[in-house]
Amino acid sequence: MRTGTLSTRICEEYGIKYPIFGFAHSVDAVIAITNAGGLGVFGGTRSTPEEIEEAMVKIRRAVGSKPFGIDLVLPPGMPQVDNRAAIEAELPAEHREFVQQIYTKYAVPPATRPGMRSRFVRSTEMEDRQLAAIMASDVDLFACGIGAPPRAIDQAKATGKKTCALVGSPHHVERAVRTGIDLIVAQGYDAGAHTGPIGTFSLVPQIVDAAGDLPVLAAGGVATGRHIAASLALGAVGVWIGTAWLTTQEHQDHLSPLEQQKLLAATGADTVISRADSGKTLRQIRSAWSQEWDNDKAPRPLKMPLQDILVGDLLGAIDEHGIEALVHSPAGQGIGWFNQITSVKAVVDQLVTETEQALSAMGIPRA
């Protein structure tokens, strides 16, 4: 039996009212997304195992039996152990000097604590500890933002959790399917944070065709109900949204005032893809930070986790001390639709209403 006026097979399978999966780094936003009828997914990659455990408990208490998820980035090729000193020893002098020039040029005071990207190393050791915390929890969905290693998927399935992989190219689908994944997110070029080279409208139908019977969610630039209706027309059974929650009340404690201002003022044309934060492609609000690294005289960003450790403390100092020119935030090209602070519920309600209107205009029943 379908659970809402805007309902697809994914709603029945996951026990949710609307086919809207909402990714956020804010626990409060995740709770609100789930309680508004979607499925909130906590971005846990930069959280310690202890923080993950705490977040899972807090979310469960707030949502009751409603389903929610957690996402980890698990890229291949990471070092085996969490050893910052060993990573620092590999950093080229040219890159160290460039980072120091940014400190000097923008008068950035030193950070008083390690940055979000440098307080631990993205390593197999840390991944295993994070996975252990996730598997010990009762979270319903385990999603892999980059990479879907069988060791992680097997653990999740063994503990009764649904599994999900985000993909940005059709050739990633076969590998994900072999792991026994339950759900695929087709994330297009429009998306915030880590994203691939193919636009959402080109990518989604290719992933749907390649996935066979596996359900597919559309991601990347999904900002209105018309985008959701279009995603359903392309064969997706729902959507995965991240940018929409950045300007909600529930997410504001997770952002600095400068980040809030830049997000509210931004249009889709104000985003740019850079590897400067982590070594991986990351769509973010354009700033002096991305421009410095795009300069012809800048060194090429290092691979993850070397870039994490190279710039992590500097990024932390930029946020801690509010260095306006350098402050930036991940965001997708849909950011232009979100120019005022509102609530998660208001966003969900508007998305649902707009989707139903768009489907009705095309002569398609709402359910």
Image (tube, grey):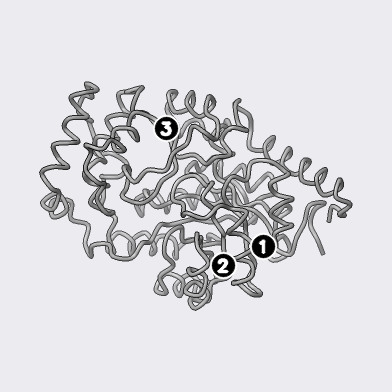
Q: Residue at x 53, y 64 (%)?
A: 164
Residue bearing mark 1: 14
Give coordinates of residue 212: x percent, y percent: 64, 75
Amino acid at circle 1:
Tyr
Give coordinates of residue 191: x percent, y percent: 52, 47
Give coordinates of residue 29: x percent, y percent: 56, 40
Lower position in the chain sequence, tag 2 or tag 1? 1
Q: Residue at x 35, y 51 (%)?
A: 280
Which mark is nearer the camera, 1 or 3?
A: 3
Q: Which mark is residue 162?
A: 2
Lower position in the chain sequence, tag 1 or tag 3? 1
Q: Which mark is residue 286?
A: 3
Q: Which mark is residue 340?
A: none
Amino acid at circle 3:
Arg
Residue contact between numbered discs 2 and 1, judged by CB atoms under 8 Å: yes
Which mark is nearer the camera, 3 or 2?
A: 3
Q: Quadrant of the C terminus?
A: bottom right
| Secondary element at image label 2 | strand
Q: Residue at x 43, y 50 (%)?
A: 194
Locate residue 223 relative to residue 309 in the image: left or right: right
Q: Is residue 210 above or below residue 145?
A: below
